[in-house]
Image (spheres, grey):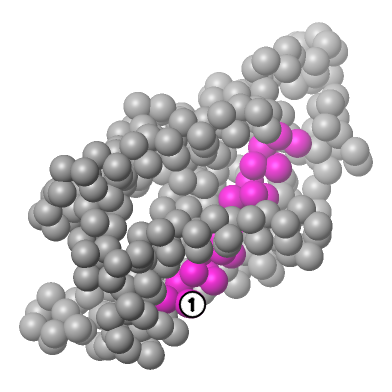
């Protein structure tokens, strides 16, 4: 099974019978704690040769070429920092909703482009961060005018969800396995379909669409969106853990940062809409 995260699914992480579920790290890897398993990076076009394989010496590759938690944290800080900086500029310049929509479309295009590339591109990822930041900053400024404090509430809510999911994941309360992945994918697809249907009705003159974004139904949809995004955040943590355990190339740190940024932006936007609904009623 391919990973639910498009950032990692093209690299084999989380595929059945390989990394992710019921498999041990690659033999010779400094993180190895169990029986040897197939390396999901063996067919990666820029993967490092694995020790002990035919034609290669048994010495382990230099650790500077491997993905580490420090690399992931630093790249995530850069990517999220770019989002925040672009959002601040959009807020200060009081950019309109037209610019926000353009930013959203550009972010979506760059995100899909990176998801289908075979190698990470820091330029595309940072470009996505700028476009996403412009969208979120302009949208936050607009919502905050009608619901004062909504932006800060969304920030606090996003930080709280991140901390809670990280704690639950690290303590083992959340077990990311195949069943968890399938449930998250099904929930995400269902949520996306409902959102698109609601948007379609709204665009074609049905006012607020099917009512999924207003009143108590909108509140329930917003809560569901946050919960589903939290599931994907746990999947992101799993992908990072697998990447480090299996000796992913250092470049993959950019993809880890990209995946985390996409999910956190989703959570923030859901909280922003919730704050808008709650402060408007």
Give the position of the N terminus as an image quadrant.
bottom right
Residue 94 horizontal side relative to residue 74, left or right: left
Instruction: Let me know if residue 225 is in the magenta part.
Output: yes
Q: Main secondary structure of the magenta part?
A: helix
**In the depicted structure, whether residue 165 falls above or below residue 7:** below
Residue at the image position 24 percent from the left and 56 percent from the top: 141
Residue 206 horizontal side relative to residue 8, left or right: left
Give the position of the C terminus as an image quadrant.
bottom left
Residue 163 horizontal side relative to residue 115, left or right: right
- For disc 1, the marked residue is 224
Res 182 visible = yes
Which residues make up the magenta segment?
222-245
Q: Residue furthest right?
A: 34
Residue at the image position 16 percent from the left and 43 percent from the top: 93
Q: Residue furthest front?
A: 148
Tell me where residue 29 appears, x and y as whole percent.
81, 27
């Amino acid at each position: 099974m391919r990973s639910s995260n498009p950032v990692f699914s093209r690299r084999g992480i989380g595929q059945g019978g390989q990394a992710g579920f019921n498999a041990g790290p690659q033999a010779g890897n400094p993180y190895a704690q169990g029986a040897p398993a197939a390396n999901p990076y063996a067919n990666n076009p820029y993967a490092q040769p694995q020790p002990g394989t035919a034609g290669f010496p048994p010495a382990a590759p230099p650790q500077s070429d491997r993905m580490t938690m420090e690399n992931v944290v630093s790249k995530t800080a850069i990517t999220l920092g770019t989002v925040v900086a672009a959002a601040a500029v959009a807020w200060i310049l009081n950019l309109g909703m037209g610019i926000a929509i353009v930013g959203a479309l550009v972010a979506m295009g760059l995100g899909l482009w990176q998801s289908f590339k075979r190698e990470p591109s820091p330029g595309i990822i940072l470009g996505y961060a700028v476009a996403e930041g412009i969208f979120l900053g302009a949208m936050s400024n607009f919502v905050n005018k009608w619901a004062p404090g909504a932006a800060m509430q969304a920030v606090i809510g996003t930080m709280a969800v991140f901390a809670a999911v990280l704690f639950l994941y690290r303590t083992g309360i959340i077990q990311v396995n195949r069943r968890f992945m399938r449930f998250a994918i099904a929930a995400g697809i269902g949520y996306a379909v409902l959102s698109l249907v609601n948007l379609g009705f709204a665009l074609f003159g049905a006012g607020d669409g099917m009512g999924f974004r207003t009143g108590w139904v909108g509140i329930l949809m917003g809560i569901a969106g946050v919960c589903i995004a939290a599931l994907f955040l746990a999947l992101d943590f799993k992908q990072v853990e697998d990447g480090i355990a299996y000796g992913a190339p250092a470049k993959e740190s950019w993809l880890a940062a990209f995946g985390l940024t996409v999910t956190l932006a989703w959570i923030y936007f859901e909280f922003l809409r919730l704050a808008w609904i709650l402060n408007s009623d």
